[in-house]
Image (cartoon, rainbow, N blue to C red):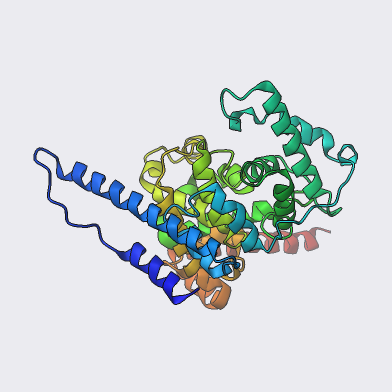
């Protein structure tokens, strides 16, 4: 990233609002809100001018620079910018075309058609029936052509939500090329024969939450709600649960320019942000699952993105992938930050846990059970 660009982003991220005089009769809260809105509008206008200037240079913008733009307030701002910068970031040439194929021969053709037919909720109200049909035909082509590029790519319900977002921003040809690229990395774990790998990713949410709030993580574990609430968040990049198309595009700026596990980090950030609301309900499966599953539509996503990026920086993928997922119920009883230490000093932590009341209880139960088993075997030898 150039010094000028770094300075631009730093100046606008850290700058403080101007100290304006309070208009007569206006409350402090209203004044701050108005000032915040004015500063945000000014910031976005300057950011748009900055991106336009970068694009007019006629040279590719560096990946670092694109990611910095994507992660700061407003993301890449408009679909006109995204048409260029999404492709540039992933190294997809604008002239790239996926291999032509007979889409009716695709193994999941029937399921694709069914899901495409049901995607009316993301088509603007008032769209003519002929236009709706054209959109669905193009969406079907994007899905099948991008998956048919390799025999090990399997369709999953939710792939059409990601594809529709790409279609809206890029058009059919470039959307198919970009989706094919995403299948090689970002979506690779979801397009396998099953969602086992996706399930393992979902299980990382509670361990991540535990690093910032052991109390909340323990509450979720005790309720036995699990992490199934996040399935549609992760496999559709939130397109299935967020109603605002602009917000969806904003989130896709982040996901495209971040590691494949970024939806997991954002999911953890959302759970942490909603801590008090979650812990208000009864600690039992149905209540906790419902409050987790029902994602509010007016969340401060710029703040949540910032929090998710901080989680990513503090606990990068190479670390969280080493966490002993199946044992996180026990890890949460270890003092704060002990969870991550298991991947480095599991022997010491096991001894430490064994000396806690919970560890002594488990050890005692094991010894009693083993003694009973040994006694029954010993007695059986003399009865023969």
Up-down relation of residue 79 to residue 320 (above or below): above
Q: Quadrant of residue 357?
A: bottom left
Residue at the image point whose x is 75% and y is 54% from the top: 180
Which of 136/283 is in front?
136
Up-down relation of residue 3 to residue 334 (above or below): below
Position of the C terminus by quadrant: bottom right
Q: Is residue 100 left or right of residue 10?
A: right
Q: Quadrant of residue 366?
A: bottom right
Residue at the image point whose x is 86% and y is 48% from the top: 100
Which of 59/207 is in front?
59
Up-down relation of residue 144 to residue 119 (above or below): below
Q: Position of residue 262 (x, y in %)?
A: 56, 58
Q: Position of residue 29 (x, y in %)?
A: 19, 44
Q: Position of residue 37 (x, y in %)?
A: 30, 46
Q: Is residue 307 left or right of residue 375?
A: left
Up-down relation of residue 12 to residue 239 (above or below): below
Q: Single out the residue that lies furthest toward the left.
A: 24
Asked if residue 281 can be seen in this view, the reply is: yes
Residue at the image point whose x is 56% and y is 46% from the top: 226
């Amino acid at each position: 990233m150039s010094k000028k660009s770094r300075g631009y982003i730093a100046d606008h991220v850290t700058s403080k609002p101007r100290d304006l005089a309070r208009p007569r009769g206006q409350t402090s809260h209203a004044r701050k809100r108005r000032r915040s809105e004015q500063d945000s509008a000014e910031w976005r206008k300057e950011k748009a001018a900055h991106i336009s200037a970068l694009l007019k240079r006629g040279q590719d913008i560096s990946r670092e620079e694109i990611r910095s733009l994507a992660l700061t307030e407003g993301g890449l701002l408009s679909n006109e910018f995204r048409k260029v910068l999404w492709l540039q970031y992933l190294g997809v040439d604008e002239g790239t075309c996926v291999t032509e194929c007979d889409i009716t021969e695709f193994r999941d053709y029937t399921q694709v058609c069914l899901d495409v037919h049901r995607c009316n909720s993301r088509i603007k109200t008032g769209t003519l029936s002929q236009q709706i049909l054209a959109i669905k035909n193009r969406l079907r082509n994007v899905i099948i052509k991008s998956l048919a590029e390799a025999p090990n790519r399997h369709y999953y319900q939710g792939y059409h939500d990601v594809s529709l977002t790409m279609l809206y921003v890029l058009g059919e040809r470039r959307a198919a090329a970009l989706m094919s690229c995403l299948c090689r990395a970002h979506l690779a774990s979801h397009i396998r024969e099953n969602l086992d790998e996706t399930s393992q990713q979902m299980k990382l949410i509670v361990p991540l939450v535990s690093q910032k709030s052991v109390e909340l993580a323990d509450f979720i574990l005790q309720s036995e709600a699990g992490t199934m609430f996040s399935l549609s968040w992760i496999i559709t990049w939130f397109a299935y649960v967020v109603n605002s198309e602009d917000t969806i595009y904003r989130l896709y700026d982040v996901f495209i320019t971040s590691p494949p596990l970024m939806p997991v980090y954002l999911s953890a950030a959302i759970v942490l942000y909603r801590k008090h609301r979650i812990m208000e309900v009864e600690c039992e499966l149905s209540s906790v699952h419902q409050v987790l599953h029902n994602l509010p539509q007016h969340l401060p996503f710029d703040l949540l993105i910032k929090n998710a990026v901080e989680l990513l920086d503090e606990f990068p993928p190479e670390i969280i992938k080493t966490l002993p997922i199946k044992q996180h119920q026990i890890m949460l009883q270890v003092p704060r930050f002990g969870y991550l230490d298991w991947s480095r000093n599991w022997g010491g932590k096991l001894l430490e846990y064994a000396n806690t009341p919970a560890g002594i209880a488990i050890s005692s139960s094991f010894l009693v059970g083993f003694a009973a088993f040994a006694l029954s075997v010993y007695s059986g030898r003399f009865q023969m």
